[in-house]
Image (cartoon, helix red, strand yellow):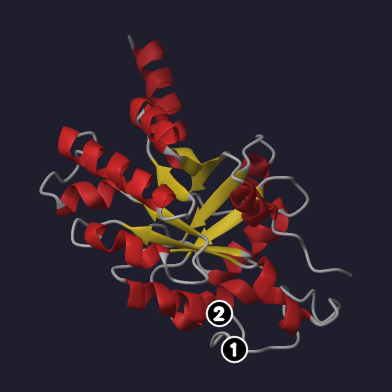
Amino acid sequence: MDLPKNHFKAGLAAGRQQIGIWVTIAGSGHAESIAGCGFDWMLIDTEHSVMDLATVQAMLQAAAPYATQVLVRPGSLDLVEIKRLLDIGAQTILVPYVQSAEEAARAVQAVRYPPHGVRGVAGITRASRYGAIPDYNARANAEVCLLVQVETAATLPHIEAICAVEGVDGVFIGPADLAASMGHPGNPGHPEVKAAVLDAVRRIRKAGKPAGILSLDPSLLTEAMAAGTLFTAVDVDQAIMLRGARDLAKKWKT
């Protein structure tokens, strides 16, 4: 059995636009249904959801037969949590709330085996197909993709330094938290926030890294893609469901 290829990471390296969806609803059946919808990637979000480790593993297993690549966001820059997500088979990790180059370097250390990092070594995990992948520990680093999330106004001046950290494969801008930190909570569409987001995307690309974003605002998504985002999340599963349900209720109750 060979080490699975991280096609998402390869796509970033090739400069190919990859369209994704945010997944916040727990369940293997749900993950399987989303995986078959045709997105390039889907992100399982454990930061702002009730998902536990066993649920994430079941979702990774359910989505595995599909072409859609699965990313996972841990709750924080926590070495133990990230290690466990990698062990259950996540190959791309999006670390939230990275504030500096030093924190970005810690994230790199968390996803890499020694001597290039501090990821704990275990021989029988889903990541190694329970020991069936030859030399997994020596080869795993090459297929692990690390994305870091910049989401506060205080972090924006450090974008170039974060991009310069070896092992960071992409930098994600979070408009919602950025808006709150700029004094516009709940309003990521504020002109000041939009300008900051687009400037950040351009600076990330100029620094030589792929840029990413999540937004439910089609106009911001279009502008962000024009500015250079390469991994672009265009909606959230629960938001899609709620829009449809509310529209249906409104249609039949009026």
Foreground residue among 122 and 194: 194
User: Which label is found at residue 120?
Assistant: 1
Task: Tell me which residue sits at (72%, 83%) in the image.
Answer: 137
Name the residue type under label 2: Lys
Task: Tell me which residue sits at (75%, 84%) in the image.
Answer: 124
Whether residue 85 is visible here, answered yes or no, is yes
Give the residue at the far left of this rendering.
183
The quarter of the picture where residue 131 lies is bottom right
Q: Residues within 10 Å of mark 1 (few under 14, many from 20)?
A: some
Residue 28 in the image: x percent, y percent? Answer: 64, 54
Residue 172 in the image: x percent, y percent? Answer: 41, 53
Is label 1 in a helix, a strand or a loop? loop
Q: Quadrant of the N terminus?
A: bottom right
Give the residue at the far top of this rendering.
254
Using residue 27 as the reference point, say whether residue 166 is left or right of it. left
Residue 87 in the image: x percent, y percent? Answer: 64, 76
The image shows residue 133, relative to residue 31, as above or below, that is below
Task: Tell me which residue sits at (23%, 44%) in the image.
Answer: 196
The residue beneath circle 2 is 83
Residue 194 in the image: x percent, y percent? Answer: 25, 37
Name the residue type under label 1: Gly
The image shows residue 181, relative to residue 202, as above or below, that is below
Do the residues bearing badges 2 and 1 touch, measured as CB atoms within 8 Å?
yes
Q: Label 2 vs label 1: CA separation?
A: 7 Å
